[in-house]
Each structure stands twice: as structure tokens, then as C-alpha cells.
């Protein structure tokens, strides 16, 4: 699947390394999921002006594999804000290190909750 990434800077961009892959050179799904969770967490913390934690992830589908050496770009965008929760849409794209064609490899929606110093939900201050 060839696709075009969003026209903005990614939240995270990394190169897939051998330690992130199985014996066949395919990147572990959990590694990619961790990147996506981190990207969503950056958006949640920035929007809530403080600590926020992941409480759910919905709809993750893998569309294409990621290989060792691919450049992985993760894009996260705030989709909805509740009293203490935030829904964040995340997409990951891979690009072969020798070509400029991108492919969407996965996407998911993450739910974060803003928490206070006692780890209790707190209200997200409207912008």
C-alpha cells in the first residue's frame, strides 16, 4: 500500500534497526506499537499541560511490513477531548532508505487520561 504521509512534521521519526526485528528482518509489531504510544503520549502531555497515561488503543491494523533500515515516521493528531480524556489518532509510515516512496504500515486510535500527582484523573484545561 503506497500512501502519502500528512503534510506536517512527524511526532517521531526513527530508523528500524536489527534489534527491533525478528530473524526474517521484519520489525516487531510491539516495537512499532511502542513508537505509536510514545507519539500519542507526546500529544497528550502537550495538550493536557502535564502527565497523561494510555488507557486504551483501538483499531490497530497492520497494512504492510516494516524492514530493517526503513525510516519509520509516526504522525499523531488530537481527535477529541473529553473532561479528562483525549483521543489521539496515530498513523505510521515507512520509507525504504534508498527510495522516496512511503507506505502506510499501521494506524490506531489511542485514549489517554490526564492525571495529577496522585495518579488520579484530572480535568484537561481547554485551550
Image (cartoon, rainbow, N blue to C red):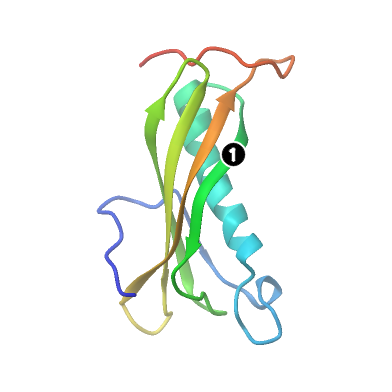
From the image, which quarter does the N terminus lie in?
A: bottom left
Q: In this rendering, would 28 be left or right of 109?
A: right
Residue occupying the point 51% across, 55% down: 60
Residue linked to disc 1: 56
Against 90, residue 67 (above or below) is below
Given the current orientation, which residue lies at the most extreme bottom position?
24
Against 82, residue 90 (above or below) is below
Residue occupying the point 45% across, 13% down: 125
Given the current orientation, which residue lies at the most extreme front position?
59
Against 81, residue 93 (above or below) is below
Residue occupying the point 45% across, 34% down: 87
Residues 10 and 67: in front is 67
* Residue 72, horizontal then vertical, whole percent: 47, 66
Q: In this rendering, would 6 be left or right of 82?
A: left
> In the picture, residue 16 is in which quadrant?
bottom right
* Residue 17, horizontal then vertical, whole percent: 62, 74
Label 1 residue SS: strand
Residue occupying the point 61% across, 36% down: 54
Amino acid at each position: 500500500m503506497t500512501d502519502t504521509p500528512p503534510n506536517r512534521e512527524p511526532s517521531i521519526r526513527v530508523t528500524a534497526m536489527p534489534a527491533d526485528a525478528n530473524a526474517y528482518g521484519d520489525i516487531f509489531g510491539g516495537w512499532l506499537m511502542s513508537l505509536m504510544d510514545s507519539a500519542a503520549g507526546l500529544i497528550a502531555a502537550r495538550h493536557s499541560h502535564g502527565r497523561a497515561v494510555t488507557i486504551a488503543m483501538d483499531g490497530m491494523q497492520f497494512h504492510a511490513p516494516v524492514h530493517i533500515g526503513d525510516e519509520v515516521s509516526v504522525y499523531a493528531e488530537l481527535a477529541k477531548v473529553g473532561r479528562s480524556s483525549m483521543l489521539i489518532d496515530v498513523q505510521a509510515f515507512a520509507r525504504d532508505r534508498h527510495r522516496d516512496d512511503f507506505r502506510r504500515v499501521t494506524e490506531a486510535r489511542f485514549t489517554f487520561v490526564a492525571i495529577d500527582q496522585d495518579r488520579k484523573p484530572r480535568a484537561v484545561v481547554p485551550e
